[in-house]
Amino acid sequence: MALLVLILLGATLGWLASILARTEAPRDILRQIGLGLVVSVVAGEIANRGTVIGSLSLLGLGVALAACIAALVLYHALARRRARA
């Protein structure tokens, strides 16, 4: 169940990041959803001590949320910097 929650959290945050950044290219939207999904699952698994099949702790959920937001902010900062150069 924890894995499903982390997947949904990451995909939703990636989708919301693409809306907030006003991304229009489908490839970029999917890239942001994928980045959010991967970061959320990895960070949640690490914070939850490797148990993704069982229940998700509040700490694991918080770490996954924070890591996902940080990764998406960093991605957008680097993408903006690359577009200016």
Image (cartoon, grey):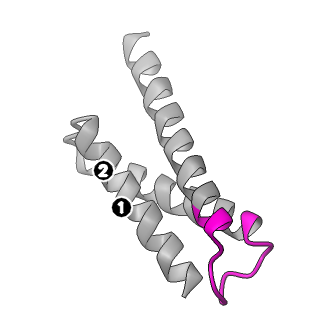
The image quarter in which residue 44 lies: bottom right
Find the distance from the CA under tag 1 to the CA under tag 2: 6 Å
Report the residue marked by disc 2.
16
Side of 54 where 4 appears, left or right: left
Question: Of all residues shown, which one is farthest toward the top?
Answer: 85
The image quarter in which residue 45 lies: bottom right
Residue range highlighted in magenta: 47-61
Give percent across and percent down for residue 25. 23, 43
Q: Residues within 10 Å of mark 2 (few under 14, many from 20)?
A: some
Give percent across and percent down for residue 35. 50, 53
The residue sitting at 78% across, 76% down in the picture is 50
The residue sitting at 48% across, 72% down in the picture is 7
**Quadrant location of the N terminus in the rendered image:** bottom right
* 68 to 11, vertically: above or below: above
**Quadrant location of the C terminus in the rendered image:** top left
Give percent across and percent down for residue 62. 59, 58
The reply to whether dot 1 and dot 2 touch (C-beta < 8 Å) is yes
Q: Tell me the element at label 2.
A: helix
Number of numbered discs on residues: 2
